[in-house]
Image (cartoon, rainbow, N blue to C red):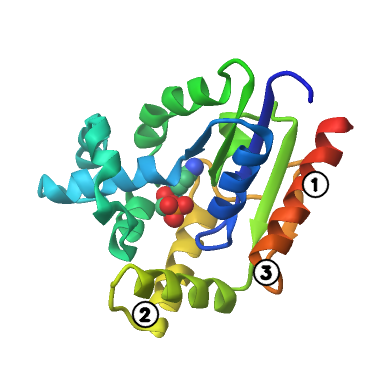
Amino acid sequence: MAQDLIIAVDGPTASGKGTIARALAAHYGLPHLDTGLLYRAVGRQCALAGGNPDDPADALAACDFTDDRLGDPELRAEATGGLASRVSIHPAVRTALYERQRAFATQPGGAVLDGRDIASVIAPEAQAKLFVTASVEARAQRRFLEMHEQGRDIALAEIAADLAARDERDRNRKDAPLVVAEGALVIDTSDLRREEAIAAAIAAVDALAAA
Ligand code: C5P
């Protein structure tokens, strides 16, 4: 295995990118960072402080969250994902979270990061860039099952509407929109089982890292 292997895994919500990123980290023995969690922490902190996530100053003030916040189970809630998508629009928030992600990506040995702008902004030099996607229907169904496993009662239609709204915001924002980066390999997980998606990702990383 080459030294300092950086693996960037980008894609929309509930595409399976988190599962794939964790599996890749285990397979290659690399540390993993779920960068969505950082934006979720900002969104949650902003809401708890009574701030407005659409206001750049309120959102920026919430970037000083402590590491304890990253263990807050409410970060996984669908509503927090919506708040994260709103605070992540502000360039000042993205700048405030940049160094932490950059330092993680460039640590000795390498790392796996998943998010929206890993291959385009955080680690453009990554040897392996994957873009994991799936249809809105498949993603809504997955998120629905995940939420119910966590005991969260939320309707499928509400999840689908929320995913569509977040996709729209993430793709159309000016700063670091969700894009398929140059050189990224697209994996569509709509019709893949978990093990198939992971096997496809490992094969893709092996091929990209060897190139
Ligand atoms: O991946 P996850 O659903 O946890 O991300 C929550 C929100 O955080 C996304 O909808 C997106 O707006 C934002 N995000 C981002 N850049 C990242 C990771 C997440 O803008 N690298």
Q: Of the residues tagged 1 and 2, which is closer to the observer?
A: 1
Q: Of the residues tagged 3 and 1, which is closer to the observer?
A: 3
Q: Position of residue 77 (x, y in %)?
A: 30, 61
Q: How many numbered dots are placed on residues in this image?
A: 3
Q: Are marks 1 and 2 in contact (CB under 8 Å)?
A: no
Q: Earlier in the sequence, mark 2 or mark 3?
A: 2
Callout 3 secondary element? loop
Q: Earlier in the sequence, mark 1 or mark 2?
A: 2
Marks 1/2: CA–CA distance:
34 Å
Residue 26 picture quarter: top right
Q: Are marks 2 and 3 in contact (CB under 8 Å)?
A: no
- Looking at the image, the residue that sits furthest to the left is 50
Q: Residues within 10 Å of mark 1 (few under 14, many from 20)?
A: some
Three-letter amino acid code of the residue under disc 3: Arg
The answer to whether 59 appears left or right of 88 in the picture is left
Residue on which the image places disc 3: 193
Residue on which the image places disc 2: 158
Q: Residue at x 25, y 55 (%)?
A: 74
- Looking at the image, the residue that sits furthest to the right is 211
Residue 28 picture quarter: top right
Q: Position of residue 38 (x, y in %)?
A: 37, 40
Marks 2/3: CA–CA distance:
24 Å
Residue on which the image places disc 1: 204
Instruction: Give above or below for 20 relative to 71.
Output: below
> In this view of the protein, which residue sits in the foreground, 85 or 75?
75
The answer to whether 195 appears left or right of 118 in the picture is right
Three-letter amino acid code of the residue under disc 2: Glu
Instruction: Give above or below for 22 relative to 137.
Output: above
Callout 1 secondary element? helix
